[in-house]
Amino acid sequence: MSDSPPASPPPAGPPAPPPGPQPQAVAPAPANPYGGPAGGPAPQQAPAALLRPTALNGATTHGVWGIRPLRHPKEIPMLIVAAVLAALIYLTWIVLLVWLSQGPAVEPGTMPAKIHELVTGTTGMELLAILPVLPFFVWVGRAMLYARARANAVQMSPTQFPEGYRMVVEAAQSFGLRRVPDAYVALGNGSINAFASGHGFRRFVTINSDLFEVGGSARDPEALRFIIGHEVGHIAAGHTSYLRSFLSQILVYIPVLGQAFSRAQEYTADNHGFATAPKGAAATMAVLAGGKYLGAQVNAHALAERAVREKGLWVHLAAWGASHPLLTWRMHALRDRSAPGRLMIRPRDTAAWFPPFQPSGHELSAIWPTPAQVLAHMDACRPQVQAEEQFGRYPGVEYSTPRDTLRWASPVPVPRGPAALASPAASEPTSTTGYGYTPGGHMVSFSQSGATPTGGTTPPSGLRQHGEPSSPSRAEQPAPSPDCAPQAADQAADQADPAAPAPPAQDGEQEGRQG
């Protein structure tokens, strides 16, 4: 046995704190971190126009109709059609239920007998059962969509993606939203997408990570500003309300009309995006068309011109069956602010700003050039603005050619040689007083009455913002030189393939078109 004295018992009370700085006691955070009680008004007394949203006053201070100059003119008429159809459908449902409850005696072969057979069949009974619970399904679907964002996505805040969140708040303030919507970044897995929705009186926007990345300085922050303005515009225009969602579910089953209604809403949202970030319009369409890496090399004029050049039944069928406008049509509407975007018919031929510079898909293949002719043409010509890298822009690399210079360069090629080395200035869209846009700087503030759109197209005088000089007008753009495809190049093509006939010249075509 040891003779050492027994160990003394540990002192009573809590153990001594470890060395180093100690955590400080944190007071419980208020339920409303921006001041005021949870769910209550801000500390300052808010005017009546800024009270919480209700079912009757709309999401913005502009009322249930939102900012009218930014709304596509066909949207509300189609919304009225949807409301009338929904009322007729449910009225018919009530009449059928009353009729069936009376146990009608019908004679075989008569029209009532056929209606009775149709209604009491499997499909008819399913419709009778679904219609009364459809509003509940829409409500549950919206709730689950919001719940998935709250549970899985990254929420923007003043400390998490603060630059993107500031864009959301600024857009909400510009459009007069009564409350700032929630904003989330969700894993995109390569998908370029964003959407806006709501549940109850709460509204939110979700942007896929692959699309959110365009806001980096290596790509285009103004494109992200346009995208956020587009999605917040859906909220400001009332597209995310429960009633609108329910009516959209009715219209989606009506061929052509349902898709046209969706396209009108997208044009309305584009107008809101343009009002927030006009310089990001072309960048957004370029990203949607070419992706986040190649978007800087997509020519906005070339994209918009194809809305006029690409014609025919199949193109229109593709447009009529789409929930979003064709990208070429959207770019054309964002470039020409004198008229709303086209829903059913392509822009007219007179809406082109440049002569044809590439064969269109509707033309006969007999006039398409041969490989030798195109190679000779490319050897004789070059783009008006040269890009250092045509396969995308990446972080950490310095590029001397600005993005907008590439996007707004003329799509018509110019001849190679010392006389054509000077690059023309970028030609941007045009009228700051065009349809759905109010001048006034980077952010646009709308009065209670809204802005008044004016007509007219001014291609392409340049959109002057932040003190930038005006870009040259279309008349000042250098015309494509007939020497771009010299006779020597044609002779070389003929020698390479003597049997190949030269494509016939089209009315108004430049020599550069043929190669």
Image: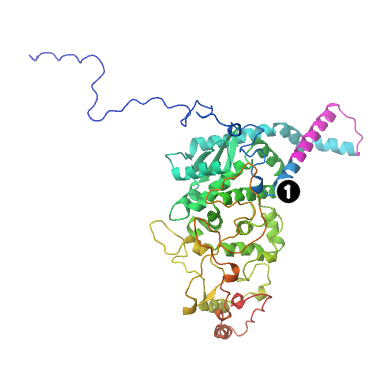
Callout 1 environment at 10 Å: few (<14), some (14 to 19), or many (20+)?
some
Say whether residue 388 is left or right of residue 276.
left
Reply yes or no: does residue 443 show up in magenta: no
Query: Is residue 242 positioned above or below 310 on the image?
Result: above
Which secondary structure is most common in the magenta stretch?
Answer: helix
Residue 511 percent location from the top left of the image:
61, 78
Query: Is residue 445 something that shows in the picture?
Result: yes
Residue 92 percent location from the top left of the image:
81, 35
Residue 138 percent location from the top left of the image:
65, 35
Say whether residue 88 is left or right of residue 448.
right
The answer to which of 143 and 329 lies nearer the viewer is 329
Q: Which residues are magenta?
A: 83-110
Quadrant hosting residue 501: bottom right
Say whether residue 328 is left or right of residue 22.
right
SS under mark 1: helix
The answer to which of 64 and 509 lies nearer the viewer is 64
Q: Amino acid at mark 1?
A: Leu
Q: Quadrant of the C terminus?
A: bottom right
Query: Is residue 417 something that shows in the picture?
Result: no
Residue 190 percent location from the top left of the image:
50, 51
Q: Residue at x 73, y 34 (%)?
A: 131
Q: Which residue is mark 1?
A: 257
Quadrant hosting residue 11: top left
